[in-house]
Image (cartoon, rainbow, N blue to C red):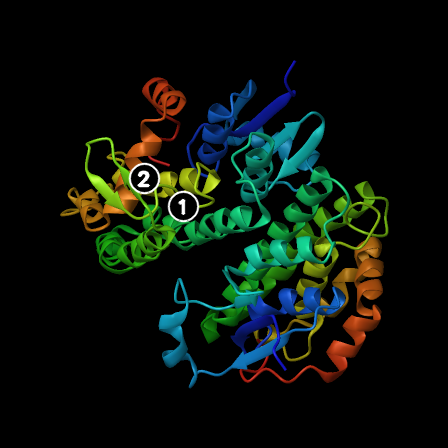
Amino acid sequence: MDRSVKLTYFGVRGKGEIIRLLLHVGKVDFVDERITKEDWPELKPSMLFGQVPRLIWDGQELYQSNSIVRFVAQKVWLVGKTEDDFTKADMLLEHSADFFKELRGLRFAEADSKQTLVDQFLQKFLPGWLEGAEKALKLGGGEFYVGNQLTFADIAVYTMLSFLMWEEEKGFQNVNAEDRFLIMDKYPMVKRNYLAVQSIPEVKKYEESRPDSFMPGM
Amino acid sequence: MGPAVKFTYFDLLGKGELIRLLLTKGGVDFEDNRISFAEWGNMKPTTTFGQLPMMTWDGLEMAQSHAIVRYVAKKVGLAGKTDEDFFQADMILEHTNDIWKDMPGLRFAAPDVKQAKAEEFLKTTFPKFLDGAEKMLKMRGGEWYAGNQVKMRGGEWYAGNQLTFADFAMYMVLFFISWPEEKGFQDVTGCDGRFKLLDNYPLAKANFIKIQNIPEIKKYLDTRKPGNPPGL
């Protein structure tokens, strides 16, 4: 059957997962093409900036993960009601990118400095990051980040918190990081929103059948 | 009467200048609030995201430089006409992150590795980035005449066949590379001719010059004062 939406990314969560969740929640029928390292050298030259994720949407080729998130969110009406709503959601998407940037630093840390970096992440970076998210929720009315409705902001923050809570998360392997499972308790609105997104039927269904990452914890 | 706009950032170009350019081209009368690192220490806890740049636009408080870029672009008509135009411009803006993420590494490198980092950047990162940019412009197709009357084959603009925030985003990256004061290229040797690299990318170069010569931008650049600290 001919599909008009195809996401191409590595068979990991990484920079593709927000897009995948958004497509599922937006009820878009899409091909979730998951590639491996072996596939990559042949595919790379056909990508505009030599990178994935790539989304093909009705013949249009889209790159840059967060540009794709914003594009899909528009298409599936998960952008709030106004320009201001869109911008507020956009800020939270950027906020999530800050998280992911720090997380990648942990994932690729040298063994002898990893514990120090994880400690800094959990004690210095993360509380500030969660504080910002909690403030945003308060301003937004408490339940959703923006516009009193589900938007791509909730999906983005959820994806980051899922990395935080993921047993296999590479950034927290071979270090003492048990605190990470408890830290959200200090930010009750964030936690409530996280659990609410987790229980969205399309999210639940996707997560139950999601293939394992071919690079564990990524 | 126009919107009440206050833009807060350090007295630098950094992540703020792109927004300042968009506000300037858009003819927005804005308060260019430049603060010191010390003042920021006091201000930070009072803000939602604890980061700069920050902007308030008719009461809406915003952080995250690229979210602000996209917002301002829409408000001042520099976001293309369709969703597809906007996407194209957005993709280019995101593409500039590939250079931005390397800037701190260049600027604040330890003295014993700075030379190697600068060379690696000019040899590999920057040309690769320009490959993508030139490809983007070639894909646009068409023909136009650059200021020097040379016929250009390929796009005049990065997105939507018109001036958008994408052109400004690219302009900022190329400006930093060309800038004599750029901190990333202080205390290194053999990098003074770096801007000649752009000669291999005629469309990207022509677009850069075009943005520089937009009247409002030219006027702004001619009167821009050096920041503190410089080169950032």
Residue at (62% x, 23% y) in the render: B5
Q: Are marks 1 and 2 on the same chain?
A: yes
> Where does label 1 land, which residue?
B158
The reply to whether dot 1 and dot 2 touch (C-beta < 8 Å) is yes
The picture places residue B194, in percent across and down from the top left corner, at 19, 46
Amino acid type indicated by mark 1: Tyr
First in sequence: mark 1 vs mark 2: 1
| CA gap, disc 1 and disc 2 | 8 Å
Q: Secondary structure at mark 1?
A: loop
Query: Given the image, what chain letter belongs to the residue carrying mark 2?
Result: B
Q: Is residue B131 above or below residue B30?
A: below
Query: Given the image, what chain letter belongs to the residue carrying mark 1?
Result: B
Q: Which quadrant is the N terminus of chain A positioned in?
A: bottom right
Residue at far top of view: B1
Q: Nearer the viewer, residue B188 or A58?
A: A58
Q: Which quadrant is the C terminus of chain A positioned in?
A: bottom right
- Answer left or right for A192 relative to B44: right
The picture places residue A106, in percent across and down from the top left corner, at 53, 67
Residue B207 has which mark?
2
Based on the displayed image, in which of its 4 quarters is residue A122 positioned?
bottom right
Q: Is residue A161 above or below residue B19?
A: below
